[in-house]
Amino acid sequence: MLPPIRQIATRQIVAVRGKALEVRDDRIVGEAPLEILAAGPGQDPVAVAVTMRTPGHEAELAIGFLRTEGLIDGPEVVRTEVGDARHLNQPDDTILVRLSKSFDPSVVAERHFVATASCGICGKASIDEVAIRCAPLPDGPVVSRGVILALPDLLRVAQRAFDATGGLHAAALFTPAGELIAIHEDVGRHNALDKLIGALSIAGMDTARGFAVITSRASYEMVQKSALAGIGLVAAVSAPTGFAVRTAIEADVTLVGFARERSFVVYADPARRLTTDEEWKS
């Protein structure tokens, strides 16, 4: 399936290399605001957040966002609706998630959601709201050292839009054997993960049977979102933040950083999900 039209655009650019100038067409990644709303039966839509994102897969992003922020459990989603094409130039810049039960608007006011592609959800009322508590994660899956070492190459092969623009993050779910289950891209690393989790939720897939790989640094939001979705192992190609490590320890998430160039660093829980002692000694 080809990328959505608004995901990648072509523009004329001037490339400067020393004294040489080259005028040519280049591909750039798309970015546009998405307003996410939620409503239960007979309820007026509640505006939850506005996030900058790469157009495409709006339903997955909205459902994933609501789930990873602890606002819904997932099964209560009935359907999604984009904006009214009669009044909006870009109807898919607004999406309403219809739920089977009432949505409490007070949780939105308390959380103070402001989302951007770069920083995720900012301005939360207190540190207690940042560290959302979730149910204890089950043991497993156990992933070998060799699978983690091979991930960067496997992930890059699946990143079509990145190869075209160089401007997108990706989030993917792999099986313990290193087989790709699903991948999503977005200009925002948080949006890519939300799209992935939303797509898996729509498909009714068990996220606990795989582990997540992200092409960005591991911030606390990425660990928190993964934990709330039941993903117990997160591998990032870049560094984790200190609060991400703390969040991983508290949420019982195995956290791997710098998973690139045939190496990686384990920051939290090295034994339970990653490998056996014999493999570490070999």
Image: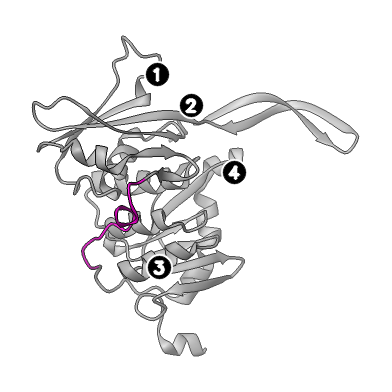
Dots 2 and 1: beta carbons under 8 Å?
yes
From the viewer's side, name the closer residue of 147 and 81. 81
Give the residue at x 45% y 35%: 53
Q: What range is drawn magenta here?
A: 124-136
Q: Which residue is mark 3?
A: 246
Q: Which residue is mark 2?
A: 6
In this rendering, the label closer to the viewer, 2 or 4: 2
Please determine whether, in this image, residue 205 is positioned above or below residue 44.
below
Q: Quadrant of residue 133?
A: bottom left
Give the residue at x 54% y 60%: 237
Please determine whether, in this image, residue 146 is positioned above or below residue 13.
below
Q: CA distance from mark 3 to mark 1?
A: 40 Å
In this rendering, the label closer to the viewer, 2 or 1: 1
Residue 46 is a magenta residue: no
Instruction: Identify which amino acid the numbered label 3 is placed on.
Output: Arg
Labels 2 and 3: the sequence-earlier one: 2
Q: SS of the residue at dot 4?
A: helix
Q: CA distance from mark 3 to mark 4?
A: 33 Å
Please determine whether, in this image, residue 132 is positioned above or below residue 39.
below
Instruction: Locate the N terminus by quadrant.
Output: top left
